Amino acid sequence: MPKQTLSAYSSVAIGSQVWMDSNLQVTCYRNGDPIPQVENPRKWSNSTTGAMCQYEGEKGYSKNFGYLYNGHAVNDPRGLAPEGWRIPEDSDWQKLIDFLGGNDRAGGAMKHEGVKYWKRPNSGATNSNGFSALPAGFRSLYGDFRHLGLYSYFWSSTSFNNNCTSIKVLGYFDSKVIHTGGPAESGYSVRCIKC
């Protein structure tokens, strides 16, 4: 049976917000329709509808890192987030970042501490709030995989420009949160916020 359950996710209160404390791992939309798991690079690159994958098809990846979803899945009207949750907007991310000290410091507070998952030096990582960001890497619009162990990439539901949706990036080498855009054909992690 496709996975789309609220009980599978625990939460963490940070300031006035409540976030999932791990990356999304659903395999179907809120209405029960399955999300295609696409491993073939060409099919991924040519996809114009929602798709998900594990990093390089590695079984067990999703247990720690969640799935990577393309932007079509994130914005699908059937709803990617489980009932009671939603995909955060830029304003939600900024509220979290501001509460944690701003763009130059918040990444450290959000990152899982140590180097079990993150490459050294994992600068500034304290996980002081329980957000527990892990370096899940991403899947490019060409279908290849990049940056496992180096970076966390999180979708926002906010448009960045005509061709991209906003994403947030945390890196192993500093405590910053980078704001940029990613094309809908790329695959990034999803971290949901309570409605």
Image (cartoon, rainbow, N blue to C red):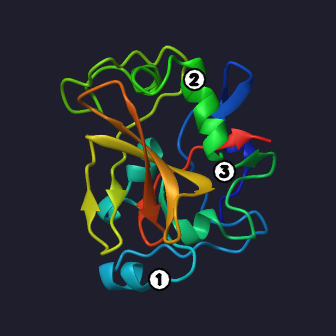
Q: CA distance from mark 3 to mark 1?
A: 21 Å
Give left or right: position of 106 versus 8: left
Point out the tag, 2 or 3, that comes first from the N-terminus.
3
Q: Is residue 66 visible?
A: no
Closer to the camera, 170 or 137?
170
Residue type for callout 2? Asp
Point out the tag, 2 or 1, that comes first from the N-terminus.
1
Residue at label 3?
87
**In the image, residue 168 above or below residue 73:** above
- Look at the numbered disc 1 and give the secondary structure of its residue: loop
In the picture as drawn, the residue positioned furthest to the front comes out as: 161
- Looking at the image, is mark 2 or mark 3 nearer the viewer? 2
**In the image, residue 101 above or below residue 149:** above
- Quadrant in which the N terminus appears: bottom right
Q: CA distance from mark 2 to mark 1?
A: 35 Å
Q: CA distance from mark 2 to mark 3?
A: 19 Å
Residue at label 2?
98
Residue at label 1?
47
| Tag shown at residue 170 | none
